[in-house]
Image (spheres, rainbow, N blue to C red):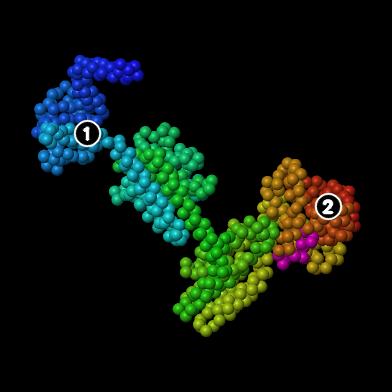
Amino acid sequence: MDLKYLPYIIIIFLGITGLVIFIFFLLKNKMKIFNIIPIARETIVDSIKDNIIVLDNKNRILYLNPSAQNIFKCLNINFVGKPITELLPDYYNYLNNKADNPELSVEIVLLRKNHKRDYDMIVSPIIYSKEKLIGKVVALRDITEQKQINKSLNFRIKFENLITTLSTNFIRLSSDEIDDEINYALKTVGKFTSISRIYIFLFHNHGSRINKTHEWCAEDTEPKIKELKGISTENIPGWLEKLKKFEPVYIPDVSKIEPKSKEEKKILKSQGIKSIVIIPMAHGETLTGFLGFESIKIKKLWTINDITLLKLFGEILANALERKKAEEEIRYLSLKDKLTGLYNRTYFEEELKRLNTKRQLPLSFIMGDVNGLKLINDAFGPKEGDKLLRRIARILKSCCRKEDIIARWGGDEFSILLPKTTEKDSEEILKRIRGSCLETDDQKIPLSISLGTSTKKNYNCDIRTIIKEAEDWMYRRKLLERKSICSSIISSLERTLQEKSYETEEHALRMKEMSLVLGNSLKLRENKLNELSLLSALHDIGKIAIPDEILMKKGKLTDEEWIIIKRHPEVGYNISGSSPHLVPIADAVLSHHEWWNGAGYPRGLRGEDIPLTSRIISIIDAYDVMTHDRSYKKAVSRQDALEELRRCAGTQFDPSLIEIFTQL
């Protein structure tokens, strides 16, 4: 035998030997292998989480896996051989009453532990040889959680789409349409989320109070929008604490509300509210209000995702309201006078064109000019002047009809347009305005406005002529009233000065008497004597603008307080310059604290550069103060007062005037 074939012979031999051994092993373990398969199959079926029911071809139960036994509570009950309807009474309804239907996939609902559970039921046929049906396998898979997840996901997708749509709607709206769109949005979201009430509260009065401005209620829920106005934020301390941090307030069960929120609990329980969500509404870093979602019938559960969408909804509404507010402010500024709230001149002139028709005749026009505004501004500052203008504006509104157009024509001028108003009726309105001004007694100076009126009776008459005529009458009236107005203003200033300082009416009378005696001895002219008489009462008029706490202070004044006190001659000068009757004494008022040696204030004048009337008044004022009691000092004798004046002659006082005065 050729040795070269030896390797092949060995390989063949080993292959045959291995095959024989494998066949022997297979025959020996045949029964064991085939016994494993049903055991494995049974183990798989028993351990599966789905609920498995095996039926015969007559729908009788052959087998239930442990999961199925558990849900049907038949662990110790033998259901084998019983019809499937013992476990599933509606089994044939699931099959659409087709008992021969071998295959089915349908969702069913079963009551388990007093709770409904959703199942996906799959019925599969068991086929033997030659397609013979010998039974069925019914598999029940619990899909309750999955359905809830799908439902929640579907809800969120729809809610997101809804919010997007509502947001888009607001973009194209004008400010006049925003309120209606907000009400529609509340209704849409309220119905979609199946809540009882949805509303908006906005803060006002510097955040101390809240007003319910918008509300939607379900059909069986009582509206509360009219009742919930001007509520103090002290009633919602717990909510406010979170809202200020821009955090939502979620109370799923009002009965379990935290003890620290007892005020809120009281409010909610009184209205029968079961659960609530409060969403902060803000513009930038400012909390402007909040959006509320109330559930009355049931305890409404909201997920984190739901609340996130509610916050987005709140932002949309807050932005819409802020845009409305901004546009209304712009419109207001374009039509109204910001200070008084009346219409501005631009709007007035537009209305003048609109109402200048035959149908509105007779068309009356009133022009008014406020008296004493400059004096008020100079004496008490622009704030008091603004207060005066606002008071006049309120009087004009109270004396006119709703259809009348009232405007601030200029700085201190007002105009009124009265459609279908006769000349006689407009004169009655003038009387009402004057009467209201006289009845107002809480102003720094008497409230007064000079008025003129004119009426257009013929359509062909130029309206500009009517306006000019009303202005002319107003200025004539102002000239006629000038003396009485100035007199009342001066009297009011004197009263104010007496109320604010130690200057009494008796002090003013004594000074007037002494100044006239000294003036006559100097042979002053009558106009200078008149100035002395007026200066005696009003030389310290600038003190009416000094705060009471400084002016009436009994202790030593601080350096800052002295600076304020030393401003009163300048203030007095401004006041005097604002009134025609006081202009002649303005320079003397400014200089009555100047010293002969130049050490006085406010300008450091010396000698005869100081007005003569100022030098006279300073001597008489010092003498009268020394010889009469004040709350902060006792009076000295006349002789001691004269000695003090002589001592200060040449420094504080004019020495020649001191000599004459001491002789008198």
Instruction: List the residue tagged with mark 2.
Output: 600
User: Which quadrant does the C terminus fall into?
Assistant: bottom right
Residue at (48% x, 39% y) in the render = 241
Asked if disc 2 and disc 1 are in contact, CB closer than 8 Å, the reply is no
User: Which quadrant does the N terminus fall into?
Assistant: top left
Question: Quarter-wise, where is residue 54 in the image?
Answer: top left
Task: Provide residue 555's location: percent of width, then percent of height.
Answer: 73, 41
Farthest residue to the front: give it. 1
Residue at (52% x, 62% y) in the render = 331
What is the chief secondary structure element of the magenta stretch? Answer: helix
Instruction: List the residue tagged with mark 1.
Output: 140
Magenta-drawn segment = 579-589
Residue 427 visible? The answer is no
Q: Which residue is at the front of the view, 616 or 564? A: 564
Question: Quarter-wise, where is residue 25 in the image?
Answer: top left
Residue at (40% x, 53% y) in the render = 166
Q: Which of the two discs, 2 and 1, labels the residue nearer the N terminus?
A: 1
